[in-house]
Image (cartoon, rainbow, N blue to C red):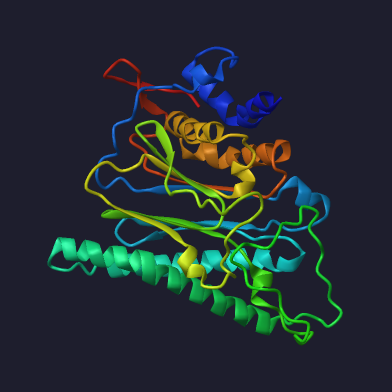
Amino acid sequence: MLHHLFHRLLSPIRRVATTMCGEGSGDKPEEAAAGPAPTPEAPPGTPWQAIVASVAGASHQRVGLPNQDAIASQTTRQEGIVLCASDGHGSARYFRSEIGSRLAIEVGLAKIRTFIDRSEEEDDERERWARLLEHEARDRLPREIVLAWREAVMAHAAANPRPADATAAANPADDPPPESAPEPASPTEEPGEVPIDAYGATFLAVAVCPRFILYLQLGDGEIVTLEQDVADFALPRDPRLLANETTSLCGQDAWREFRVRLDLFRSNRPDLVLIATDGYSNSFATDQDFLQVPGDLWTALRREGPAYLERNLAEWLTESSNLGSGDDASVGLLFRMPCEPHLLEAEGSGTKEEVSP
């Protein structure tokens, strides 16, 4: 039953890979996924591109709740790009979490761009610069993101007080409080006040610039890299994130809960980086099934070009969410095209073939 469900979840992307590789009817998706030979790394100076999509889950649509996810990308100076995603917790206690996720994206993009700008002020000694950059990434940047988010949340709460008779709409998929979230507001709280935890949300980000790539994560969701057709999780799993438990921006000392990875570009860069909120990744029963997706998307990018994914990604997310978790689903991709769209080196030859879209 579960295997059949995965076939259906993967089918929108897998059908593309099967058709483009010309390997039959799609009855053997594992073989179709093999695709062409590994792609050479994009030439230096090739710009990074981003594609993002976010859809409201079926469970939210049925009761008229908004999409709690937010996702966006932004370019930086000197060929850099930042991609951020956030998943609002969505249950009754977190009744403004769709706003919290949007604010997380706004402050995350701004603070990470500032971090990249600071990184350009290189110390004369490279090793010293690398140590300082690592410290900034692991300590200063998470603090700045959390502080800026809390300030933005408090400003929004002050400008939009809660009416005395307001009641929060309950989420049918009511999730337990995030593990690191503060205790609910005390009964003596004034009716017009809105507690910070009402805006609770997760945070995921990837920043790429010519000299390094940075991965940040607080809470659930996934960041996956694809390099030479091998997909892997960019960050270690947090063993505390079981079922619906998650760390959160509204938690006490939330900056301490960030998982951070900083890679200086001394060797190969990934071909593609994927960010997904848990509404998408939870639509797959195993990590192995989920890890097939980046390779399929990369094949589609190389064969059909970015515009094809931009047109279809939201539809694929909707199908996966409807058949799987029923939750809001968001996916963001960062990639560098090794060649012009519709041109791909033919497997087993040194020539390029044109592929019709």
Q: Nearer the viewer, residue 352 or 258?
A: 258
Residue at left offset 41%, top offset 48%? 49
Which residue extends farthest front? 239
Q: Nearer the viewer, residue 241 or 170?
A: 241
Which residue extends farthest right? 165
Give the x, y percent position of residue 126: 16, 61
Q: Work out whether 345 lies above or below 210.
A: above
- Residue 83 in view: no
Residue at left offset 71%, top offset 67%? 94
Give the x, y percent position of residue 199: 65, 69
Q: Is residue 337 left or right of residue 44?
A: right
- Residue 255 in view: yes
Give the x, y percent position of residue 90: 71, 60
Residue at left offset 81%, top offset 61%? 170
Q: Is residue 284 left or right of residue 211?
A: right
Residue at left offset 78%, top offset 82%? 187
Q: Quadrant of the N terminus?
A: top right
Q: Is residue 117 left or right of residue 73?
A: left
Q: Work out whether 349 lies above or below 56.
A: above
Which residue extends farthest left? 124
Give the x, y percent position of residue 275: 50, 48
